[in-house]
Amino acid sequence: MVTTSIPTTPFSDQRPGTSGLRKKVTVFQQPRYVENFIQAIFDNVEGAQGSTLVIGGDGRYFNDVVVQTAIRMAAAHGFGRVLVGQRGLLSTPAASCVIRKHKAIGGLVLSASHNPGGPDGDFGIKFNMSHGGPAPESFTEAVFKRATAITEYRIVDAPDIDLSRIGPTKVGEMNVEVIDPVADYAELMEQLVDFGKIADLFRSGFRMRFDALSAITGPYAKAILENRLGAPAGTVVNGEPKPDFGGHHPDPNPVHAHDLMDLMLGPDAPDFGAASDGDGDRNMIVARGLFVTPSDSLAILASHAHLAPGYAKGLAGVARSMPTSRAADRVAKKLGINFFETPTGWKFFANLLDAGLITLCGEESAGTGSNHIREKDGLWAVLLWLNILAVTKKPADQIVREHWAAFGRDYYTRHDYEELETAPANELMETLRKKLPALPGQRFGGLTVQSCDDFAYTDPVDGSITPKQGIRILFEEDARAVFRLSGTGTSGATLRVYLERFEPDTNRHDLPTADVLAPVVQAANEIAEIAARTGRNEPSVIT
Ligand code: VG1
Ligand code: CO
């Protein structure tokens, strides 16, 4: 089989963001665009010769084409073996699991996660390291640098392989194994949560709905919830992954998973509702009549995790991304365990997990995970919740209310201003930065600024410093506003404003979130001059 070196010229826009390189499908479809980026990744993988590489994606439009290209390029680069999910599919958590279990040197995960798919939607490529987690900034920056100077890529001349059949094949000298995308993952879940108790729960008549939003988690949820745990057929809806997600926006939040919300808040609500995102690493949890914020979910899982076999010995510690509410901090304090606050993006948890400093971690954006892999894991979070419900025999909403009664409630909301023009969005952040020194003591919307800063993170394991990770403003009234620009969008800029207020009084735990947070919203808008600088009077999405 012939390996060819194809001359190429660089693209200037191949800098990975919060989670890999994400662009419109039409950008990825430019000749040599995918090849350049994959070559730039491979050029930075040390010890590739003869090693194992994992390849898979969330099945979105263009997944099928890029999987075949990646395999041909892996063969040309000297990898010894590729493990690829059947039909080119692997959820992000399953890819992480497979990398770890089969001691791969890393993996290419093809996904733009919660971004919409289809020919006019988004595509993405990220590289995960041998620990199974997203590449750190040092690696992604090196990839970017390589991509800006690339002169050729290498590829073997071979036909597409048949991805429909599980089993071994060869591309050139390289072994390729088409694997069942669910098997390794399901086996891992069985070690962590009590399948027997969850099966008993379903047998007792417990009903749930899992909305896979026509994305990758469908096959995993059907195999585990319906086939293994005995949930009635039809528990999983929108369970077939589709290239355009059936028109769904595969972002599991109350806005985009509105069908599930309507059901759970309506008169015929089942006992429990859940959803996950495009690549299966996010989760949404809904109790009957009550949406559980991801920040609360992390805190609740942390305080109950010992009820599941995988965590029976207790937790080493908990970490959360900076904009995530402080609910988990209180649990860590009560348990007397480590606690860390990291920048947004899962890659910042990897060192803490590897060093054994934490066991659970999570983000306000519906990501929760543990030391079982190095990615957030949507279905795992749902299974851990089910384990807790099965052991406590309490309804989910009662668990949430009891948590608030014990620890207080963090009212929480996020305002996203999408597709802003880039220049004014950057200017808004710069102006805000300049204002910081003068803010303490000033009053906005009836609240007084106590302190503020531009979050910088020093990794406690390797000492690396990551500056400018979001501006946070604390108010004396136990409220907080955080501002940052998204690193996953593909057109213009997205401003994210995270708003929260702590309420210790149990008598005030059933108020509408929007009412409680109105003063914080007002203060945030005034401080950042959002309307004047963006020309928007309302956010595009409120979650
Ligand atoms: C968003 C979330 C962040 C998450 C990232 C990847 O990033 O805020 O918490 O880790 O998406 O999630 P940003 O930079 O747009 O705010 V996923 O499920 O899209 O891989
Ligand atoms: Co995702």
Image (tube, rainbow, N blue to C red):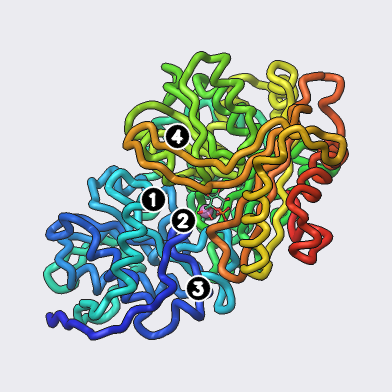
Q: Would you say 77 lies left or right of 28 here? A: left
For residue 134, which numbered disc appears in the image? 1
Q: Residue 510 in the image: x percent, y percent?
A: 84, 29
Q: Is residue 259 visible?
A: no
**Which badge, 2 or 4, is on the more N-terminal residue?**
2
Label 2 neighbour load within 10 Å: few <14, some 14-19, many 20+:
many
**Which badge, 1 or 3, is on the more N-terminal residue?**
3
* The N terminus, quarter of image: bottom left
The residue at the point 78 percent across, 28 percent down is: 477
Q: Residue 132 in the image: x percent, y percent?
A: 34, 46
**Between residues 476 and 60, which one lies in front from this camera angle?**
476
Q: Is the residue at mark 2 in contact range of ligand 1, meaning its CB lies under 8 Å from it? A: yes
Residue 107's place in the image compared with 492, above or below, is above
The residue at the point 50 percent across, 73 percent down is: 61
Foreground label between 1 and 4: 1
Residues under numbered marks 2 and 1 in contact, where contact means CB atoms less than 8 Å apart: yes
Foreground label between 2 and 3: 2
- The residue where tag 2 is placed is 19
Label 4 neighbour load within 10 Å: few <14, some 14-19, many 20+:
many
**Which badge, 2 or 3, is on the more N-terminal residue?**
2
Q: Residue 337 in the image: x percent, y percent?
A: 48, 18
Give the Cα distance between marks 3 and 4.
30 Å
For residue 61, which numbered disc appears in the image? 3
Foreground label between 2 and 4: 2
Q: Amino acid at mark 3?
A: Tyr
Quadrant in the rendering for residue 167 = bottom left
